[in-house]
Amino acid sequence: MSVATARAAGPAPMSRREVLEAMSGLLLGMFVALLSSTVVSAALPRIISDLGGTQTDYAWVVTATLLALTVSTPVWGKLADRVDRKRLVQTALVIYVVGSAAAGMSESTTFLIGCRVLQGIGAGGMMALVQVIFTDLVSPRERGRYMGIIGAIMAVGMISGPVLGGVITDGIGWRGTFYVGVPFAAAAIVVLQRTLHLPPRERGASKPDYLGTALITVGVSVLLVWISFAGNQFDWLSAQTAVMVPVALASLAAAVVVERRVSDPLIPLELFSNRTIRLVVIATVAVGVAIFGASIFLVQYMQIAHERTPTESGLLTMPMVLASMLASAGVGQIISRTGRYKRWMLLGSVLLTAGLGLMGTLTEDTNLVLVGAYQVVIGLGMGMLMQNLVLVAQNSLGFDQMGAGSALVAFFRSLAGASGVAILGAVLASEVTSSIAAGLAANGIDPSALGSGSGSLPDVRTLQEPIRGIVEHAYGSGIAEIFLFAAPVGLIAIAAIALLPENPLGTVSGIEAAARKAEEGGADDAPEREPGGAEDEAATAGAYGP
């Protein structure tokens, strides 16, 4: 065989065993991040009640993590294109664990929210870097074969988390839910060190984009804080709004100017000239609002509207998680075999929208079997969409932009999720407050009968009739409004995916591309190009292709 032929053939792909060994630490790290998040979800109503928090605090405990995750994700992604990815993912894991351990010592919701910010920074690294490193190990065409494994890990973390969180909360107290992931995290760091071997990366010579990073952080943070508090802590039309909105918009506008001018921007704006990236971002925003913004309140519905314990509420969310796992694994295998993904993503967006609409019919009296059936519809949609949106985006990117491009999708998903939680949390707080006030007035009951006030998150176990029934009705109908509010957003995802071009999935992994580049004396795997229309996307697919 000639040298030219050998180079054309490229390095042999990694065997399944080699890929699984390299993935083991990543999957364990992902499991830790998911477990540490979901194990707390079942305990949140109890946590907020014990710490004397309000419905706004409940939303902020979730929003703080998503906010930190959102603003840190582009930074992690940019670093992934410049420095050692294994060290980065280990660093993210350490940060996440430190935040979790500190959260377990919380004596106030303010301190807890601060710890959740630290957790979010670490989670931003885990969520961005695992997806990027996966492109080093497996080509887009083969990635579906491993989605079943990723789906199983996610399912174990998501299913065991609420159940374990409920058991810990009912048994030894909610503080234990923040410590349970520490031994798993230590194991993940060790396994990553032993099994993950990536080719060295050239450090970028350009100056880091400090100004762009600061402007994006300020703009996004102020915007989300305003969304969270407007209509609750202060009026939508208020002095606070008059200050916060202009500051947020000015910061983001300045960030766009900076990102256009710097040599190595945090968020390369030329990515938006790629039609696939634009449509994936739109669909990701819609899916993020629908999934994060609505489903985060499902446990709250179970515990308050149906008087379920944390353990029971965790078990009652299993239908959605199991359906998501099965859909992700099954559709992933089909996509790897056929190379066709658009039809499944379109079906997933339809199912997700329909499921949200069905959940909008909930009341405090809805049969839990029926609630489980609605969850299955949502879960199937989630499983067909979440990983495949990332896959499609990565398939349209060159290897030199994989970190920034993957982080861009994660950034908008997190931004949408944080915005969704904040907006829907404000809507729920308003609906619940007015419903409880009306119910108490109709029964001639003084609002002080609720103890800490109608604005606090109630513990229905301590309430007597008819107050208990009033509270259950308020949360049952209020959370149904949340799902109805999110359902139309799914239509945006349907439209974006319908317009998505279906390009061939590539067959070259990042490690193989790096090896080819080394063999060819540093030449790029694909010619330099600016992502743009269908011709540029076809060129990208060709760069990944045989």
Image (cartoon, helix red, strand yellow):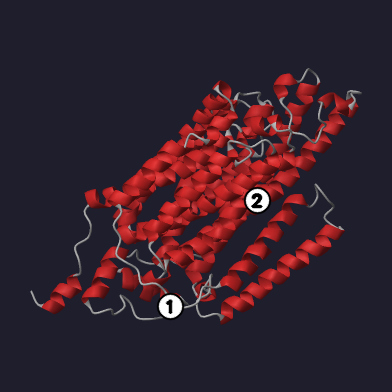
Which residue is drawn at the image coordinates 33% and 61% (left, top)? 136
**First along the sequence among labels 2 and 1:** 1
Quadrant housing the N terminus = bottom left
* Residue indicated by mark 1: 205
Q: Position of residue 61 (x, y in %)?
A: 65, 43
Kindly state the secondary structure of the residue where label 1 is placed: loop
Front residue of this view, candidates 278 and 72:
72
Front residue of this view, candidates 154 and 337:
154
Q: Position of residue 423 (x, y in %)?
A: 71, 50
Q: Is residue 418 above or below residue 199?
A: above
Q: Which mark is residue 384?
A: none
Q: In the visual, does 508 lie left or right of 319?
A: left
Which residue is drawn at the image coordinates 79% and 52% (left, top)? 230
Q: How many marks?
A: 2
Front residue of this view, candidates 218 and 246:
218
* Residue indicated by mark 2: 420
Q: Position of residue 500 (x, y in %)?
A: 48, 65
Front residue of this view, candidates 422 and 217:
217
Q: In the visual, does 273 lie left or right of 524?
A: right
Kindly state the secondary structure of the residue where label 2 is placed: helix
Examine the rendering and report whether any part of residue 138 can be seen. Answer: no
Query: In front: mark 2 or mark 1?
Result: 1
Task: Using a 10 Å C-alpha cutoff, classify the residue at mark 2 as few (fewer than 14 neighbours), some (14 to 19) or many (20 or more).
Answer: many
Which residue is drawn at the image coordinates 53% and 26% (left, top)? 168
Q: Report which quarter residue 3 is drawn in.
A: bottom left
Examine the rendering and report whether any part of residue 538 can be seen. Answer: yes
Q: Position of residue 246 (x, y in %)?
A: 77, 67
Q: In the visual, does 231 lie left or right of 376?
A: right
> Given the image, on which type of amino acid does mark 2 rest?
Gly
> Given the image, on which type of amino acid does mark 1 rest?
Ala
